[in-house]
């Protein structure tokens, strides 16, 4: 798979369809999550659990990728996304953000996230 295909599958299949086996296939042994002010390393199991934990708080979840830009190196992919969630109490919640993924040999090894904001892209 190309880096773009990996990132699209991660968001549109692993997250949207809660396909944890797909997440296990797409994530490296360790994934570094960069955020403003710091970074943390998750094992594959922790990164997959992050998806499962999120799904335990919602009854519906959908990531829409408004923009996908793949680098010429076939290792970096930037996305602008918005996610629509229905929380367990029935409340709808929307967030938007931008992430940059680093993919090596078909697996996500790093994610840069600037943090998400409530709302949708205008």
Image (cartoon, helix red, strand yellow):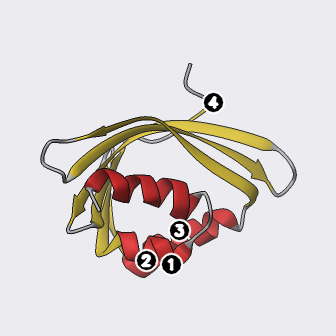
Quarter-of-image position of residue 51: bottom right
Question: Can you identify the residue that label 1 sits on?
Answer: 21
Q: Give coordinates of residue 38: x percent, y percent.
A: 30, 53
At mark 4, the secondary structure is: loop
Q: What residue is at 60 percent from the left and 29 percent from the top?
A: 120
Question: Can you identify the residue that label 2 sits on?
Answer: 24
Label placed on residue 50: 3
At mark 1, the secondary structure is: helix
Q: What residue is at 25 percent from the left and 60 percent from the top?
A: 103
Contact between labelled residues 1 and 4, with CB atoms less than 8 Å apart = no
Q: Give coordinates of residue 19: x percent, y percent.
A: 57, 71
Distance between mark 4 and mark 2 Cα atoms: 29 Å
Q: Is residue 100 above or below residue 12?
A: above
Distance between mark 3 and mark 2 Cα atoms: 12 Å
Q: What residue is at 78 percent from the left and 52 percent from the top?
A: 87
Label placed on residue 119: 4
Distance between mark 1 and mark 2 Cα atoms: 5 Å
Task: Determine crowd level at label 3: few under 14, some 14-19, many 20+ residues with C-alpha closer than 10 A.
Answer: few
């Amino acid at each position: 798979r190309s880096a773009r295909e990996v990132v699209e599958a991660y968001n549109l299949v692993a997250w949207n369809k809660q396909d944890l086996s797909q997440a296990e296939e797409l994530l490296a042994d360790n994934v570094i999550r960069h955020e403003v002010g710091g970074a943390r390393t998750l094992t594959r199991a922790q990164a997959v659990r992050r998806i499962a934990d999120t799904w335990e708080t919602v009854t519906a979840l959908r990531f829409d990728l408004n923009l996908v830009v793949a680098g010429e190196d076939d290792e970096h992919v930037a996305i602008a996304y918005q996610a629509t969630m229905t929380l367990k109490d029935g409340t709808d919640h929307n967030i938007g953000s931008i992430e940059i993924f680093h993919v090596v040999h078909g697996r996500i090894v790093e994610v840069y996230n600037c943090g998400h904001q409530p709302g949708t892209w205008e």
